[in-house]
């Protein structure tokens, strides 16, 4: 069925790096912008980053700008998030989310994965 | 940046009764050129990812029961569950997409 499946989370030391992946299935991945949204334990939702359908445009939340990089491989139907210089404040469940609009970016999300937990701790 | 504030933080409602959640944005999310409010609502059940309920402030997403309705314009919005069911126990979030996406802090809905 239509779904997003994240992977790559785990425990990482402060200052280290981690790469998350999100595999999409049963929809035309290459037609949609894709986002990462995170949720710290017991907290609310925070938008992290977006990439356009063709990978040519990226935007980031100020809290991760310069440290995180979003990318995609449309041939593999996969979204990525490269996270560098991690700190305890980055501890969260990271969700990938599909933009609701075909081609254009609408900035709201009509399909979410189940998330992958990233814990930054020494 | 637009800040979203929800009220109340939590509420307990009897089965079959109405639940009302409010969401206020720090500036208008109504885009004058198309007269659309860039406001969505999500439901997050325990241990699950969020699910889109409402977009453009009042349009129900596919498959969402009609007991869920959204209203409001400009800076003030409301999500109403007209007759609360047991499966509606969740945290509800509003989100503006007029600018860089921002969510409210969430409202936890429980059964009284």
Image: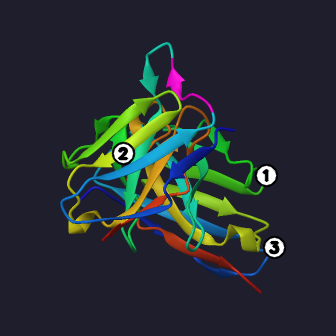
- Disc sitting over residue A66 in the figure: 1
- In the image, taking residue B82 as reference, residue A106 lies left or right, namely right
- In the image, taking residue A70 as reference, residue B38 lies left or right, namely left
Relative vertical location of residue B6 with respect to residue B98 in this rendering, above or below? below
Q: Position of residue B85 (x, y in %)?
A: 20, 63
Residue under disc 2 on the same chain as residue under disc 3: no
What secondary structure is marked by label 1? Answer: loop
Q: Chain of mark 2?
A: B
- In the image, taking residue B15 as reference, residue A82 lies left or right, namely right
Q: Locate residue A120: give its quadrant.
A: bottom right
Q: Locate residue A118: give its quadrant.
A: bottom right
Relative vertical location of residue B79 with respect to residue A56 in this rendering, above or below? below
Residue B105 visible in image? yes
Q: Quick one: label 3 or label 1, which is nearer the N terminus?
A: 3
Residue under disc 2 on the same chain as residue under disc 1: no
Mark whose residue sits in front, 2 or 3? 2
Label 2 belongs to which residue?
A: B79
Q: Measuring 40% from the left and 41% from the top, which residue is drawn there?
A: B78
Q: CA distance from mark 2 to mark 3?
A: 41 Å
Span of residues in magenta: B27-31
- Disc sitting over residue A15 in the figure: 3
Q: Position of residue B89 (x, y in %)?
A: 31, 67
Whether the magenta-drawn stretch holds residue B26 is answered as no
In depth, the one of B49 and B83 nearer the eye is: B83
Q: Position of residue A35 (x, y in %)?
A: 52, 49
């Amino acid at each position: 069925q239509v779904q997003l499946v994240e992977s790559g989370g785990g425990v990482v030391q402060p200052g280290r790096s981690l790469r998350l992946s999100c595999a999409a299935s049963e929809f035309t991945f290459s037609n949609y912008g894709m986002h990462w949204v995170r949720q710290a334990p017991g907290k609310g939702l925070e938008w992290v980053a977006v990439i356009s359908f063709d990978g040519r445009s990226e935007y980031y939340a100020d809290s991760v700008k310069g440290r995180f990089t979003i990318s995609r491989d449309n041939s593999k139907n996969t979204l990525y998030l490269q996270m560098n210089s991690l700190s305890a404040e980055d501890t969260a469940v990271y969700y990938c989310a599909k933009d609701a609009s075909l081609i254009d970016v609408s900035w709201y999300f009509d399909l979410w994965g189940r998330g992958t937990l990233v814990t930054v701790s020494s | 940046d637009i800040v979203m504030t929800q009220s109340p933080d939590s509420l307990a409602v009897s089965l079959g009764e109405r639940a009302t959640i409010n969401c206020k944005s720090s500036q208008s999310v109504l885009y004058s050129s198309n007269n659309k409010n860039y406001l969505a609502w999500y439901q997050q059940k325990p241990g699950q990812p969020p699910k889109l309920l409402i977009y453009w402030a009042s349009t129900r997403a596919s498959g969402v029961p009609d007991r869920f309705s959204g209203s409001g314009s400009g800076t003030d919005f409301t999500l109403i569950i007209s007759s609360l069911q047991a499966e509606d126990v969740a945290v509800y979030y509003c989100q503006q997409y007029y600018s860089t996406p921002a969510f409210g802090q969430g409202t936890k809905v429980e059964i009284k």
